[in-house]
Amino acid sequence: MSEDQTRGPGANAPAHPAPSVTVIAGGVGAARMIAALLQVVPADRVTAIANVGDDLELHGLHISPDLDTITYTLAGEINPETGWGLRGESWQAMESVRRYGGIDWFGLGDRDIGTHLYRTQRMAEGAQLTNVTAEIATAWTVGIRLLPVTDDRLRTMVTLAEGDDAGREISFQEYFVQRRHDVAVRSVRFEGADKAYPGPEVLAAVENADRIVIAPSNPAVSIDPVLAVRGVRQHLEAARHRSVAVSPIVAGAALKGPAARLMEELGHEPSVVGVARWYAPIAATLVIDEADADLAESVAAEGIQPVVTRTIMSQPGVAASLARVVLEPNGPQP
């Protein structure tokens, strides 16, 4: 009798199967968090529910920036210089648009345009965004299950606060890209949220996950659009004990983008304490950076357990260690 036979059934199976993980995701920060998780969890155990409030129609194309940023990052093809789009891009199509006097403030590389052409054609044929996203992810051998939060139209709209444009409402991409998020904001709303239903697998991904991770994305314009879709916030509230958020704010500043400034403009404290207050209804734990260790007690006072660790994933070795922290089987431990 062989040694394997004496061990009995399942002897070669792992003692602790990998947990199933669902990530509530925006763009760049979420993509890095998912990539970190994939260092410690098999890709087929990870689902990402992604924001589509950033989506736009431009040049006749349906563009899904957050879905594409996640896809390109996990495929190892993200443009390292910009943090968006594809590496090794050329820009001849945009040069032609510029020559004709067309809209050129939203840059689309030639390779990236191929993705939008495919998505637009498939949706024109009647395919839902969920299905097209799966097709694109498969083509890039991403491995995870990537879900847009809804197949319905959802758009983040920003009302400006100052100057001649005070009171004017513009799309998120006009605010973020065209105006380089360098204008004060009075309010944010999610157009279509009252009619948007979650995609067919979204709520089940929340219900069935061993661990839910709220990625270090902008709370106001990356995570809140996901929560605005019917039923998503309620399901996350019910799963609060399985949820951990990672703060996008470190030492009072966002690592990328306008998260801290937006929080302040919208009346929230731009710190890990403000993030704790924001996420306490939907997460039992908030992971904060060592730079904010002195605020751990204030975080706890908001009704959410603080865990202090290194969170800046651009630093060597941090990504995998951060992933292990958020996946602690009995909840992250300080």
Image: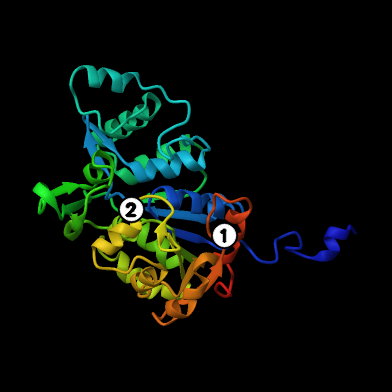
Q: Residues within 10 Å of mark 2 (few under 14, many from 20)?
A: some
Residue 309, relative to residue 316: is it above or below?
below
Quadrant position of the C terminus in the picture? bottom right
Residue 105, relative to residue 28: is it above or below?
above
- Image coordinates of residue 289 in percent, x first then y, are 52, 64
- Image coordinates of residue 101 in percent, x first then y, are 18, 21
- Image coordinates of residue 203 in percent, x first then y, are 36, 62
- Tell me: 211 left or right of 193: right
Q: Measure how far apart labels 2 and 1 are at the Cα level.
A: 24 Å
Q: Which residue lies furthest to the right in this view?
A: 1
Let me know if residue 210 appears in the view. no
For image coordinates 25% across by 43% down, the residue present is 173
- Residue at image mark 1: 323
Q: What element carries label 2?
A: loop
- Tell me: 299 left or right of 183: right
Let me know if residue 264 appears in the view. yes
Q: How crowded is mark 1: few (under 14 residues within 10 Å), some or many (20 or more)?
A: many
- Tell me: 4 left or right of 218: right
For image coordinates 37% across by 24% down, the residue present is 110
For image coordinates 16% across by 47% down, the residue present is 170
- Indicate the colouring scheme: rainbow
Residue 274, relative to residue 111: is it above or below?
below
Question: Mark 2: which amino acid?
Answer: Pro
- Image coordinates of residue 233 in percent, x first then y, are 31, 67
Question: Mark 1: which amino acid?
Answer: Ala
For image coordinates 44% across by 41% down, the residue present is 71
Rendering quarter of residue 60: top left
Rendering quarter of residue 240: bottom left
Label of residue 258 in the image:
2
